[in-house]
Amino acid sequence: MEEEFKSGFVTICGRTNVGKSTLINLLVGEKIAAIANKVQTTRTQIRGIVNRENSQIIFIDTPGIHKPKAKLNENMVELSWDAIQNSDIVLFLIEADSKEIGRGDKKILEKIKESNKKCILIINKIDLVNKEELAKIIDLYKNEYDFSAIIPISAIKPKCKEEVLSEIEKNLNKGPKYYDKEEYTDQTLRQLAEETIREKALILLRDEVPHGIFVEVQKMKLTKTQNKEPIYNIEAVIYCLRDSHKGIIIGKNGEMLKRIGTYARKDMEKNFGIKINLKTWVKVKEDWINNEKFFKSNQNI
Ligand SMILES: Nc1nc2c(ncn2[C@@H]2O[C@H](COP(=O)(O)OP(=O)(O)OP(=O)(O)O)[C@@H](O)[C@H]2O)c(=O)[nH]1
Ligand SMILES: [Mg+2]
């Protein structure tokens, strides 16, 4: 007898910087979400689709839970709570080197309990701890919820991928194929370009500057080089909160902007598999992070 087809929506939630986007990229096998060793990297829900022989898993990467300071951050945290409510399975990511259940993780546990969803506890970054420390963190969490499974992983190492996917598949219910087999994300190429540029700005800039940035691709045109090779001409504006930030992003003799652009271009060429010609500008959009109407109506925040 043929096995029945299963599908479902799996939300990846956790505090900021625990490795949610690293994990979704690994599971999907494509770079769909920005990764940076900075807090509040992901700002919205990002879908990534995994097609297996007898199942389709739709992952939802979410903004990390943190204490919101601006309206934008309040909105980000709300998006994460909504994603938990609307999922079939929750992957709750924590860091292996936590010594206690902190405030953020307690809040997340509360929301998972309220939702009563199936939940798999993923203990990430096990490369940073020894066996005893790992045993301690498992002990700390194991009775906090009736977890379907507890899986220690290191999302920077591909070998954990199959274990996570098969555990999810086991917990899925019968369901349809929501997406075509070729689709692996709901992000458009334009959004992926914007995320890549913002990721590089996050990695290269310091303090509060990168957190006040959003990127808007204003032109994306497919043409041919003189050698008849396909090339995307991309024009993007990096918006920031004030003039002093603009100066920092551009840098001395335009060097910082050039570094961000080159780094983003190389990454896009690798991920999109096509030549890219990228032009960037920097503009100020004062206090946009507190302008709810503005950021809610904008696709590229
Ligand atoms: N050592 C180690 N670092 C990891 C691991 N997984 C992710 N990281 C690093 O943790 C940092 C944060 O990763 P992200 O994937 O951006 O984290 P996130 O949870 O999506 O963060 P937000 O979007 O801000 O909520 C990056 O520097 C990753 O390279 C891991 O297994 N081990
Ligand atoms: Mg993220």
Image: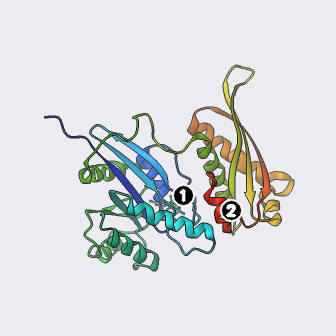
- Of the pair 186 and 132, the residue shown nearer to us: 186
Q: Secondary structure at mark 1?
A: loop
Give the labeled residue for mark 2. Answer: 210
Residue 31 in percent (x, y) is at 52, 45
Whichever of callouts 1 and 2 sits on the residue coming sooner in the sequence is 1
Residue 168 in percent (x, y) is at 30, 53
Say which mark, if any, is on residue 44: 1
Three-letter code, disc 1: Thr
Residue 37 in percent (x, y) is at 57, 62
Q: Along the horizontal axis of the image, is 206 left or right of 151?
A: right
- Of the pair 22 and 157, the residue shown nearer to us: 22
Three-letter code, disc 2: Pro
Q: Along the horizontal axis of the image, is 47 left or right of 270?
A: left
CA separation in Å, label 1 and label 2: 16 Å
Visible residue check, residue 221? yes
Residue 280 in percent (x, y) is at 76, 46
Q: Secondary structure at mark 2?
A: helix
Relative to residue 180, is residue 45 depicted above or below? below
